[in-house]
Amino acid sequence: MARDAGVKRVVLTSSFAAIGYGHPPQNNPFNETDWTDLNADGLTAYVKSKTIAERAAWDFIAREGGNLELSVINPVGVFGSVLGPDYSTSTLIVQRMMDGAVPGLPKLLFGAVDVRDVADLHIRAMTHAAAKGERFLAIAGDFLSMVEIAKLLKRRLGAAAKRVPTHELPNWLVRLAALRDPAVKQILPELGKVKNATSEKAQRMLGWAPRSNEESIVATAESLVRLGLL
């Protein structure tokens, strides 16, 4: 274990899933003081596992961490240039839109951050004295809707984005599709939910300066085109 090997600090990659789920609607953006409510209905196994795992890490440090320090990074959807066909679920969203694999867009909002900035934040959390015992949300800007992402791809990718749909599907139609598609069923609890989050803490304490949502999403699409993954 890291503690027994004399490691000074562990930086854990958690997720926004451990912060922003199971809450009633709120106007204020989520921050590092928020925790997902595990008693809420409709939480996916992924959301539950991320929350339980991060809670367990903090409990271990408090109970028997000794001199071991912990810092945690909580990314939202991670985008940016891909290196090959083994890419993230976030990238799959862009890939399916570019491929024309989805007939329309559900009413979903989510945050975005570039993979290069997530890596940078991990290094800052590892080396900065102020990061000891802290959580840091990794998000580049305000949450985006699927329609906003589609319009961005159309504007920046031109002909390469010709198959990207831009019309938003009514919730009832998405629920109907979920009866036949387990992947669609997983998004039902988040349909129409307005959320936001802030990385003010990481920027203020660690000097983190992420790329824009637009830059990271465009980099995702361009890399998919470049590597022939569409």
Image (tube, helix red, strand yellow):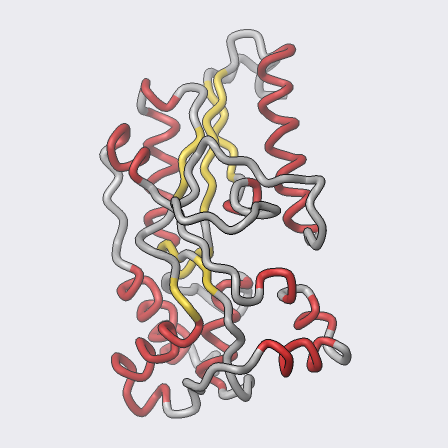
Q: Give the image location of residue 124, x and y in percent.
A: 32, 32
Q: Name the residue: 42% across, 56% down.
A: 111
Nearest to the observer: residue 19 or residue 122: 19
Q: Is residue 127 above or below residue 121?
A: above
How many numbered markers are drawn? Answer: 0
- Residue toward you, 67 or 14: 14
229 vs 158, left or right, is: right
Q: Is residue 26 left or right of residue 218?
A: right
Give the residue at x 45% y 54%: 195
**Residue reaching furthest to the right:** 179
5, above or below 42, in the image? above
Which residue is drawn at the image coordinates 62% and 38% (left, top)? 51
Q: Residue furthest top?
A: 66
- Answer left or right for 29 relative to 45: left
Q: Residue 214 at what x, y percent from top left?
A: 28, 66
On screen, residue 154 above or below 7? below
- Location of the N terminus by quadrant is top right
Picture layout, residue 17 above or below residue 78? above
User: 133 or 118, which is in the foreground?
Assistant: 133
- At 41% from the left and 19% from the top, the residue drawn is 132
Q: Position of residue 150 (x, y in %)?
A: 38, 78
The picture places residue 43, in percent across and down from the top left corner, at 68, 51
Judge from the rendering whether residue 15 lies leftward or rightward of residue 176; answer left or right. left
